[in-house]
Amino acid sequence: MKEKGFSLIEVLISLFIFIFILISLLSLTTTCLFIKRNSEINFLSSKITAEKLEYLKSMPFENVALKPGIYREELVLKSHKKIYIRKWKISNLSSNLKRIEIQVWEKNHPERFHSFPFNNFYSFIFHKKIG
């Protein structure tokens, strides 16, 4: 007499295949969320850096805001519910050249320092217009 149904081996193999596929999908989802989060952080950091750089570039060369030194400010991004720290260093390379280096990181996660070109700084050199 032949019984209908699945044997224990068939059930175990199908269960193993199901669990393997489920774990693979969970791993893929986790990786995608991690990549998305890093992309958002990098985009916001780049945007914050570019805003400050454009602001400083718009200043006249002799402006007090471009005095050599190290400056720091907190930025509250209400739309993303995050607080970022922006730090910049201004140095004179010569009488008509300045170097601006900008760093950006999340306040609650300083280990998530965002690297930009020039050895973890976004660096910009601009010169005084002559004539």
Image (tube, rainbow, N blue to C red):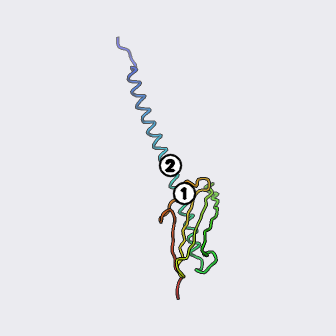
Q: Give the mark toward the camera: 2 or 1.
A: 1
* Frontmost residue, 106 versus 21: 106
The location of residue 103, given as percent across then percent down, is: 55, 63
| x 53%, y 56%: residue | 40
Disc 2 target residue: 34
Q: Secondary structure at mark 1?
A: loop
**Furthest residue in direction top, as rendered:** 1
Q: Amino acid at mark 1?
A: Phe
- Counting labels gives 2
Circle 2: element type: helix
| Image vertical order of residue 23 relative to residue 10, above or below | below
Position of residue 83 in the picture relative to residue 39 (left or right)? right
The picture places residue 16, in percent across and down from the top left corner, at 41, 29
The spot of residue 121 in percent (x, y) is 52, 64
Give the side of residue 1 with respect to residue 78, left or right.
left
Q: Nearer the viewer, residue 51 or 93?
A: 93
Measured as percent of width and height from the top left, residue 24 is found at 43, 39
Task: Place residue 17 in its image quadrant.
Answer: top left
**Mark 2 or mark 1, earlier in chain:** 2
- Residue flagged by tag 2: what amino acid is it? Phe
Q: Residues within 10 Å of mark 2 (few under 14, many from 20)?
A: few
* Residue denoted by label 1: 113
Contact (CB < 8 A) between labels 2 and 1? no
Quadrant position of residue 56: bottom right
Q: Identify the residue shown where x is 42% and y is 34%.
A: 20
Give the farthest residue toward the bottom. Answer: 131
